[in-house]
Amino acid sequence: MTTFAGTAWQLRLTTRLERWQVLLWTVGIAGLLAAIVDSMASLYPTVADREQYAAINDASPALQAINGPGHALDTPGGIVVFEVGGYLLVAVALMAVLGMTRLTRSEEEHGRAELTLSTATGTLAPLAAAVLTMIATSALIGATCAAGMILLGLPAEGAWSYGASVAAIGVFFVGVTALAAQVCGTAGETLGLSGLVIAASYGVRAAGDVGDGELSAWSPFGWVQYAAPFADHQRGWPLGIAAGAGLLLVAVAMAVRNRRDLGAALLTRGPGRPAAGASLVGLLTATVRVATPAVVGWALGGLFVGSVFGVAGEEVTKVFAATPEIALLLGTGRTEATEGYLRLVLLLIALLATGYAVSALQRVRSTERNGLGDLTLAASVSRTRWLLSGVFPSLLGSAVVLAVGTAALGGTFAAVTDDADWVGRVLRSGLWHLPAVWLVAAIAVALLGALPRFFVAAWAVLAACVVIDMLGPALQLEEGVTDVSPFAHVPQLPDVEPGMGVWVMGAAGLALLLVGNLGMRRRDLG
């Protein structure tokens, strides 16, 4: 029997298991892109409008740091790619990381991979099926995006170039996660390591685009954005580098998987102590210890993002001050240049912390589905206590990620501006985002307890916050729509004075936690 025996039926199984995830990701990403195309067409209908847009954005390192390098900004397609293209690339990278982790290390961790391999299935068949499924998903999303852009009137060559960029970044992070699943021993560690690669890649690309661009050559996001869709000088070879690097990582991952034992990892732990330490005595402490690697990975991502944008802050705010139109494009309003820039970066870090909070609660749902929750509850553990053992790491970990990213932003910005007062101001403003972060986490807890089959809606809530808060100005959203996001009610620089919205979010979050607890106590597990 070959190492790839059974790949075909395993591929059919993974495709069936992932069909709803594939549909949601494809419709969500392509739908957002279509909305941006329509919005940009109405915002910049004439050549003069697009030339003015290009002049403003070419002079803005802040926009280039957040959105990526601008190409053909005087064309409808170039504007669309600049406004939303970078965000969608990150979304596809997250899709690849989450899907690959779910289909590889999570299957091993929960014992299902052992059942699969007990049949006439080769060692590499499950990994190969997971890779093929996620690569096909990336290609489907890219093709759907390209087709949508063409149907909405954008040039076909540029549309297919951008679609290929989407597929290429997906292939790269499929390879990253495939290798991370061999290096790490748990799904949480795999997510943490892969997420750190995403954050580092984004930060390196942002730093490079603010500077002379050379640093961007070390980031996969820099590679695919160098393809320059809709420009006269479109390039296909950077996409080949990204996809080729991803396939090379897949080959390395398969070589490692073929040589390691099922359930083992390259980062092995030594033999434990004869008696359990304090961190393993009790359900809560054990859960916190299990969650620690993921918290560290997400916190390092926040540290990197905060540091990069903090170092670039002085130069960026000079451009903000000289070109007030940029602040309006970014949705920071007519605030002072410095405060407007910092508000935007703090929002980015807060959304990152929210992503950790939801992912940590996703683990509780996974534990319930694979039967480990039943084993825990078979001991003298109440359902409330079991739920809290998952909620507490989510809330605490998100606070750590937010605090680390905010402190890095404030510290580096204070260093480059030689003004130590910014440390306290930025940290205080950043921590006031915590009620909004915890409110989204509380929504996830309510879904987990009362409607567990619809837990994916928690990710939809986070995605809605990203769209409303980061893309609201581009989509021309009404004020009533933007107020739906909890982050719209966070105290902002320069005053940082909490208003009624903070206390309403706190009360709503507490009520949702009670709903989740009540639902968990009354429903059947599974």
Image (cartoon, rainbow, N blue to C red):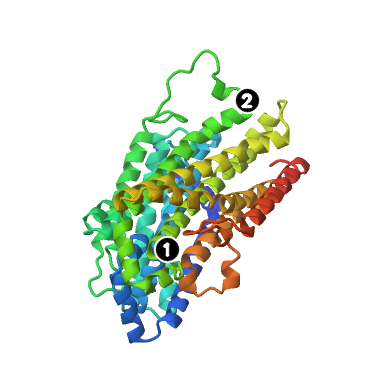
> Can you identify the residue that label 2 sits on?
282
**Amino acid carrying mark 2 in the image:** Gly
Viewport quadrant of the C terminus: top right
Q: Residue furthest top?
A: 274
Q: Which mark is residue 168?
A: none
Above or below: residue 464 compared with residue 189:
below
Q: Is residue 183 left or right of residue 457?
A: left
Dot 1: element = helix
**Amino acid carrying mark 1 in the image:** Gly
Above or below: residue 28 compared with residue 303:
below
Residue 242 visible? The answer is yes
At a point 57% along the width and 42% down the height, the residue shown is: 394
Q: Nearer the viewer, mark 1 or mark 2?
A: 1
Residue 57, image quadrant: bottom left
Q: Nearer the viewer, residue 128 or 154?
A: 154
Residue 41 is situated, as x and y percent measured from the top left of the image, at 43, 81
> In the rendered structure, which disc, 1 or 2, sits on the residue that comes first in sequence?
2
Residue 486, image quadrant: bottom right
Q: Nearer the viewer, residue 91 or 49?
A: 49
Q: Which mark is residue 340?
A: 1
Q: Is residue 126 left or right of residue 67?
A: right
Q: Is residue 147 left or right of residue 47?
A: right
> Count the marks: how many?
2
